Amino acid sequence: MDSPENKKRLENIYNQLVHIANGNFSYQIKRTDKNDALEALTFLVNSTTEELRDAFLHQGFIKLHNAFEMVVQLYFELDSLGHINRTNPTVDTLLHHKDGTLKGRPFSELLEKSSKKGWKKLLKAAPKNKIWELTLRLSLSEQSGLLLPAHCHVIYFPEHREKKGTFMVTSFNLVKKEETDQGFLQKKLKKQLQAHGLLPKPVKTETHILRAVDLENLRKAERHIMDNLDIPLPSIRDLAHFCNTNEYKFKKGFKELFGMTAFQYQKHKRLQKAHILIEHSNKTILAIARNVGFKKGNHFTREFKKRYGYTPSQLRKRSK
């Protein structure tokens, strides 16, 4: 644990937690091929960041009093060789570079290893005699080593008269912006969409505000789910009774708090626990599937791949 490599891994986890504490859920910790407690912790922190990000988006939709968000655009202008001509100030802020220090550097230097390979292939294979555009997922590295996954839109403009070929790379992300009045921006956007007929005119709707007692009751349901991942979920009626409320309030409240239904939440937690066990235990995949409540291995494999993009067997092979 005292090796320089492990100290760096701990520093990355600490930096990630600092970002989370500051309301910034954009970053991810770079994974390693280690199979130890630090790697398990890295996976948990990354998963928690994703869940907080999803909850953060959900809060923006249900408009809780303290919800806040800001859409930030990353902008890179590159020359025909892929070197940075200029960026917008937010790039320096999110990647933690001093103003002006990125100019002239290859864009690939900002990318994580696998993204760097893909970017270099794109530069080599892309036509230089016509305008083209595409969207791809890239992981940028900030100064401390954390990753910033981003969906990037790349546009290439070929040489024209005296102006040489140019790449435009843009991306959008979400960060905390406390001074932004989210409620005002939401109302303004909603009015604009209604004015253009893209949203229906406002109608009176029922507002659900979760009180402290509601939150505590719903947390009881969450703990019950987490403690019994290996067995089927009780009926909504039984869960509501367990939480001292009625079915309607339970269903509305649970989705408002967690962003998904109780059944969706249970499946999400089952798959998350399975992921950790596959990576960090020697149990068979079928035993793990049953341990988290899946009776059939093929059903487990299908749901696992739908959630993570790879099968349990592929994860186990990668973890060895």
Image (cartoon, rainbow, N blue to C red):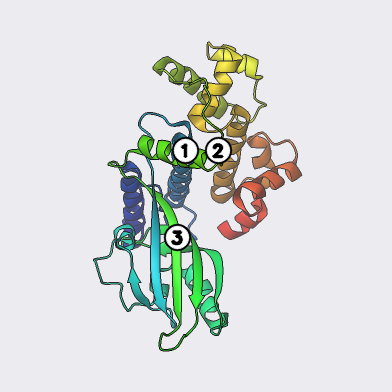
Distance, label 2 to label 3, CA atoms, is 26 Å
Q: Which mark is residue 199?
A: 2
Residue at 54%, 48% (x, y): give it: 280
- Quadrant of image for the N terminus: bottom left
Give the image quarter of residue 69. top left
Label 1 secondary element: helix
Q: Is residue 268 above or below residue 238?
A: below
Q: In the current view of this chain or complex, which residue is farthest to the bottom?
A: 162
Q: Is residue 181 above or below residue 310?
A: above
Tell me the mark number nearer the camera, choosing from 2 and 3: 2
Location of residue 179 in the rendering, given as x and y in whole percent from the top left corner: 27, 41
Give the SS element for disc 3. Answer: strand
The residue pinned by badge 1 equals 190
**Vertical comparison of 234 with 197: above or below:** above
The residue lying toward the viewer, choosing from 286 and 215, is: 215
The spot of residue 169 in percent (x, y) is: 45, 68
Foreground of the two, 283 or 318:
318
State if disc 2 and disc 1 touch (CB < 8 Å): yes
Label 1: few (<14), some (14–19) or many (≥20) C-alpha neighbours in 10 Å: some
Mark 2 is on which residue type? Leu
Whether tag 2 and tag 3 are in contact, CB under 8 A, the answer is: no
Return the mark for residue 300: none
Three-letter amino acid code at disc 3?
Ser
Residue at mark 1 to residue at mark 2: CA–CA distance: 7 Å
Name the side, left or right, on which 193 lies relative to 101: right
> Disc 2 on helix, strand or loop?
loop
Report which residue position mark 3 lands on.
171
Residue 174 is at least partly visible in this image:
yes
Who is closer to the viewer here, 305 or 55? 55
